Amino acid sequence: MSPLPPPADHGLHVPTPGEGAREELLRFLDREAAVAQATKGRLAVLLVELRRVDRLQALLKGPPAAVTLSLVIERLRPALRPEDRLAALNEEQVCIVLPRIAHPTQAVLAAVKCLRALDRPIAHEGGTAVLRPCVGIATVPEHPADPAQLLMAADVARRIAGTREEGYHVFQSEDSIEAEVYHGLDIDLQRAIRANELEVHYQPQVELAGGTPVAAEALLRWRHPTSGPISPTTVVGIAENTGTIGSLTFWVLNTVLRNAAQLAKEGITPRFSVNLSTRTLVEHELPEIVEQALGTWSVEPGRITLEITESSMIGDAERTMAMLTRLKGTGVQLSIDDFGTGYSSLAYLKRFPVDELKIDRLFVSGLLSDRGDHQIVRSVIDLAHNFELRAVAEGVEEEAIRAELGRMGCDLVQGYLVSRPLPEREFRAWWLARGKGR
Ligand code: C2E
Ligand code: MG
Ligand code: MG
């Protein structure tokens, strides 16, 4: 087969979003998919979901969508090779075709470069804003070279990417199972909430010195009637992407407070930790929702700890700070989850009104086998204590690790060694048995 002539714009032209550019890109994909098939060559399709583009538009004082998208495309262009093509599919998504790549990792590299390119604030006359993009990737020959199927696979991968910390995902054949799960999920999650398919399990936290149980983390569980258990990170990702995160958070919070009120009648009064997703933190009404739920169930605010991940503090520090201050004003405690994996600076720690640092499971599990992990755990414990915060180690599976954490002065432990996350009834039984045992 004779090689195709180079594209007329040779990558220098910035396509304006709209029908024309989109149609041209799809024709390009058609041609290149056929080339890949005929030559047994490689090709990748990247679908970039911009996320929060509405906020970008608002912050940039409302330039038309076309202007916003061309600002994004200008950013992405230098991350790509001249032969790569990109165009907006709609106001939220940009599609990139990488023809004739040598290896699938090249597609991942391109995705990472695109994410980095969008990592810095985008400026326009009105102001600046940061996007939280995610990228779905589908590659040929790992996937059939049919353009429509490729786009669909990249779209499934994009939805999964939205639930992953790294922000990208390469479509795998088993993802089609998740794709089924995702199908119509915005409705399904709402239905699941109503049909009581969601549950909250509780994982105890005990004091290192003495082993007294003092708290429990609430962890979301969803057993889908046909797909089986779905991981909480996937559920949260779906909820974030479909706009149901607000009702999900509300549901979890109310369930925990209802259980807390019931358990208190039996003299079981742990502090309960509830996870908040990054998206929830931008919901202005969150502190009022928390306050209202606390009032409804008459639970003392100090018995609730809200966990936010370290990475959610990095984006818009001023905004996060304002939200955390308002949350703290309701009387609840605040914890930074997965500490050590983000890049929060000491200056933030000093300013943010937090009560607890949770050391990421990754470092805890490597405590005895990896010197670096040992040093990180030690530093986080010392850091916590220097700021008069509690240090909690999660993911403790071995007695030797617990013992070492004890020597290091860690305050609380949580992990399979103590107990797995338990349904409410089992948690109650565990707590009572544990209480009697001492
Ligand atoms: P996380 O908040 O860091 O929760 C700790 C995770 O570690 C839980 O996974 C828990 O089951 C697991 N874990 C605890 N001890 C051990 C151990 O000893 N070994 C191992 N291998 N794992 C352990 P899970 O339940 O799958 O939850 C995953 C993540 O999903 C949570 O991470 C949290 O970020 C998120 N999540 C869970 N429930 C909610 C929720 O209600 N709302 C939000 N926004 N996120 C939630
Ligand atoms: Mg947590
Ligand atoms: Mg964690």
Image (tube, rainbow, N blue to C red):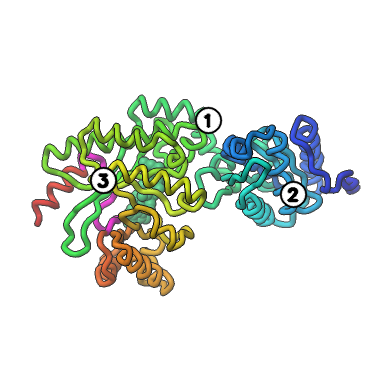
**Foreground residue, 341 or 136?**
341
SS at badge 2? helix
Q: Are marks 3 and 1 in contact (CB under 8 Å)?
A: no
Mark 1: which amino acid?
His
- Which quarter of the image is occupied by the C terminus? bottom left
**Foreground residue, 212 or 276?**
276
Residue 305 pos. (x, y %): 29, 47
Please tell me the numbered disc located at residue 77.
2
Q: Are marks 1 and 2 in contact (CB under 8 Å)?
A: no
User: Image check: 225 left or right of 91?
Assistant: left
Other-residue count near label 2 (Cα within 10 Å), few / some / many at <14 / 14–19 / ≥20: many
Measure the C-alpha gap from mark 3 to mark 2.
Answer: 47 Å
Q: Which residues are magenta?
A: 413-426
SS at badge 1? loop
**Residue 310 location, quadrant:** bottom left
Can you identify the residue that label 1 sits on? 183
Q: Main secondary structure of the magenta part?
A: loop
Measure the C-alpha gap from mark 1 to mark 2.
Answer: 32 Å
Taking the view exactly as shown, the residue that stands out farthest to the bottom is 371
User: Image check: 139 left or right of 24?
Assistant: left
User: Image check: 147 left or right of 386?
Assistant: right
Residue 243 pos. (x, y %): 49, 32
Mark 2: which amino acid?
Arg
Can you identify the residue that label 3 sits on? 272
Q: Ligand 1 within 8 A of label 2's CB? A: no
Please tell me the numbered disc located at residue 51.
none
Residue at the spot x=20%, y=34% of the render? 298
Q: Nearer the viewer, mark 3 or mark 1?
A: 3
Mark 3: which amino acid?
Phe
